[in-house]
Amino acid sequence: MNRSTIFSAFIVLFTGCSSPQTDPQQCGVNNPVQDLPWLTEIVNKAEADKATMAYKGNYIGTIYMDTYKNQSVFMVKMMMGSGGLYAYLFGCDGKQIAFTQEEAGTLFTDIEKHNNVVYTNTP
């Protein structure tokens, strides 16, 4: 076996193991950012905010997808005009999901740790 084959196999082995594994059919769609209208609206505002600060920085942040209480959820880590909320949690249908203050710390930490980013406009 030549060196380039061994090197290629090594790269594939280690990069394949480190990438996050998400369901290719998130919420029944291939691309939730494009295929879920409510999420598209948030991303469009985020793009405008990044380009021109159209929303005064309220849509600068990251959107993650994960599971919470056995359902697919999106954590939108943007203020969205809230006056300082850390993040919002939405179901696939775009409805906001309530959580307690006690749940918030571990919930957000776990979702960020899984790092299933579907959109970000931060460096």
Image: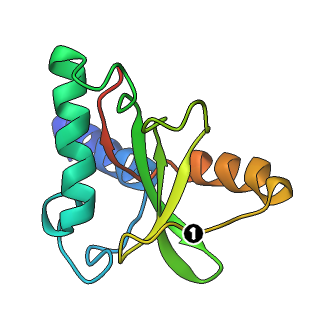
In the image, what residue occupies the spot 79% across and 61% down? Answer: 100
Horizontal side, residue 45 vs residue 96: left or right = left
Left or right of 76 in this view: 52 = left
Q: How many marks?
A: 1
Quarter-wise, where is residue 102 in the image? bottom right
Residue at the disc numbered 1: 97
As drawn, the residue found furthest toward the top would be 52
- Dot 1 amino acid type: Ile
Residue 25 higher or lower than 116, as above or below: below
The vertical placement of 76 against 46, above or below, is: below
20 or 42, which is in the foreground? 42
Check the image and name the residue furthest to the right: 102
Rendered location of residue 63, percent (x, y) = 40, 47
Whether residue 46 sits left or right of residue 114 in the image: it is left
State which quadrant residue 38 falls in: bottom left
The x and y percentages for residue 7 are 27, 37
Q: Nearer the viewer, residue 112 or 83?
A: 83
Circle 1 Cα neighbour tier, 10 Å, few/some/many (<14 / 14–19 / ≥20): few
Q: Residue at x 20, y 77 (%)?
A: 29
Is 91 in front, or is 113?
Answer: 91
Q: Could you say where residue 115 lies in the image, as x and y percent from the top left?
A: 49, 47
- What residue is shown at x 40% (from left), y 29% (from top)? 58
Percent coordinates x, y for residue 21 in the rendering? 41, 63
Secondary element under disc 1, as helix, strand or loop, is loop
